[in-house]
Image (cartoon, rainbow, N blue to C red):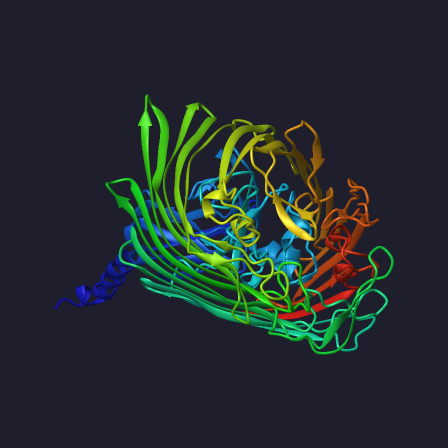
Amino acid sequence: MNSKLLFLLPLFVLFTVNLNAQSLRLKIENESKKPVANASISSNNKIIGTTNLSGEASILNAEIENNTILISAPDFQSLSYIFTDLEEQNTVTIVLNKETQLDEVVITAGRKQENINTIPSSITIMSRKEIEQQSSINSNLSSILGNVIPGLGTATNKATNSGQTLRGRQVLVLLDGIPQSTPLMNGARDIRTIDANAIERIEVIKGATSIYGNGSGGGIINYITKKSPLNNSFQGVTTVGTTFNPLHSKETFGYRVSQFFNGRKDKFSYVLGGSYDATGLQRDAKGVALGQTDGLSNSYQANTFAKLGYDFTENTSLNLLYNFYGSTQEAKYISQAGVYGQAPTIGVRGTEPGKKAGTPYNHNFMLTFSKNNLFETTQLDVSAYLNSFQSMNRYVASASGWYGPGQTMINSDKKGIRINLNTPFTIASLPSEITYGIDVLNDVTFQDLVDGRVYIPKMNMVNIAPYAQLKMDVLENLIFKGGIRYENATVRVKDYNTLATGEGNVGSIFVEGGKIPYNATMFNAGLRFNKYEVFNPFVSFSQAFAINELGRILRRADENTIESLETDPIITNNYEAGFSSKFYNFNLTAAYYISTSKLGANLVDVGGYLVAQREPEKVHGYEITLDYRFSNKLNVGGSYSYVEGKAEFDDGSKVYLNGSRIAPPKATGFVTYKPTSDWNLQLSWVNTGCRDRFELNSSGRYNNSEGPISTVNLVNFAGSYSFNENWSLNLGVENLLNNYYYPTVSQYRALPAEYVLGSGMTTTLNLRYKF
């Protein structure tokens, strides 16, 4: 071969290799044009590059499949980027948005992902960061939500969430859409049904809505569980911590352990984890052990979580979810009753008789099949779920509802299927879409005493509910949303005897069972104008359906047949107007609402029994939230919510709804400061105002749940420090000023046994490792 050709051959080969291995330089920035380091770049679930400290990465064109890459980075929203002409590009700059902007997307309101600015409803979303911050103060979800969500009653400092209504009405709690509440007989343990570490975000839809069925007169709280990564990887979070009263520490130490893994391997994805949280003795601001009535002292909560997914294609997937939650009290102290209005009920050494109170178990299982390209653009989601739940009430030596000592438990087993479709289309050049489907639910709920006596017979409900929801751009930036849902429910109850109220079966009544049919058509309609960020208004009307507290009616039956009892459902009408506003670094939301129902469910004290008051009700109120970001380091904000409600009798007279329904005004405030990228500090304040609506009864006492409420102010602190990308330390202090106070539930209940003080200063310290 010619010597010149031999000399040129290596250059030719090198030139050919370089052509086949052409590379592309990516520069990843945030909105402030600062580099984003450690961003992973993947294509077809395979990582092909990672950005350096300058936010740059070099990737080979040959590794980019279908001209598409996915960029993922901690604290940023993942972005799918499509190259239009890959061969002609040498350097590409891509901007990532902060993860907080994910709050703009909500799933619960329309059973599909949609932007919050297109929904004519009041919505509050807690991001993963906010949940972590609040759970470093108190891991109890009742406290987390009560301290943050406008319109929701503050936490009770108990294992139950009695009195934590939303806008004065019952709230429906969901876990990825699986109902946790027991509206047939409210056990008031539905908010605490999952550990905060298993939650990705919390969506709160306020006001009556029938989109998920029975029991949402005040709105919906939906826990959206953790999700797996979008590209091939293996990640994990380990948390260990302790909780104690730093001023009166004896016996107050508790601990917390949590481990979660999530990952993806090609088409298979998973999230696996669990947590265990043990609470020590709780003491008041003076160091006295708190009364133990439904308390959290010496209690535990355990959670096991698994979510598995398989993507058959990019448009077809199958997901399996299982969650177990349990929380009971291992009481080492018992209550020594105080005097309402004078001296608190305190804890003294002793053993609580009966079985452990709390939630012995709550099992959730769901299988979901999704196909995004059914009939071209139609999205299909089919879910089958199971929920098995038990609530164990505390042992009582005597009760007004039955003769002798006893301990009751509420059991609820739900099975359901949801078929949901969404089809986009165009009408006269107007972008539109329709969401439609059917819900089938079987809910079996009953309440027994542990000795075998039947307190509330089995209520076997079958509910079949078709629905349709239309969304349409009526004009440019004017969005109409309206829908209809038909509730077709039947509750079957077998023959039963009410419990005796005296010796020798005195007071027991035989009740002939039967079927109770419920049929109702729910409507909703709303408009939102979202052209301007500075003023984004909405108006809406929505209805909700509830077979509320049917169990209470059955157990207090004074007629011999089911047909003779007043068991009509509650139809709630919610009228609302509000707006959101964004102006530079200032954010403001406001809403005013009126909620009416022809039948009520206010529980009133009649001769020592809590009986449902069925008179018409009207609830109204307003909510305001605002925040201002002075800089990337300093952010301040707060909220104010007010609610009031009355029931109206046939003679035209009106009475206020009591404290179990209507919470006092609530104000919140916070200051968040980030002196450096490693530090995050927040000081928060929660204020519950006064409410005094009722007079003393003929015995010189307040009726149950009609006690006056005095103002309570609490200050909390949350701080975190990141040693590096993997290790961080979190410090939370609840009741930072060590206030000596009675929670609102202790005040309005007006019962000596429940006149319990709130916890004194409590410190939580958590060490977290991410990989």
Q: Identify which residue, 407 or 768, lies in the foreground.
A: 407
Q: Position of residue 472 (x, y in %)?
A: 40, 28
The image quarter in which residue 449 lies: bottom right
- Can residue 220 be spotted in the picture? yes
The residue drawn where x is 31% and y is 44% is 379
Give the image location of residue 499, x and y in percent. 56, 60
- Location of the N terminus by quadrant is bottom left
Closest to the observer, 147 or 479: 147
Locate residue 38, reporting x and y percent.
50, 61
Q: Determine if residue 235 is in view.
A: no
Dividing the picture into quadrants, the one containing residue 329 is bottom right
Q: Which residue is drawn at 24% across and 40% down?
A: 376
Question: Does residue 490 sit above or below 368 in this rendering?
Answer: above
Between 640 and 16, the one lying in front of the other is: 640
Above or below, comparing residue 208 to residue 684 in the picture: above
**Position of 355 compared to 262: left or right?**
right
- Relative placement, left or right, of 78 versus 126 is left
In the drawing, does residue 80 fall left or right of residue 196?
left
Say which of 193 and 607 sits in front. 607
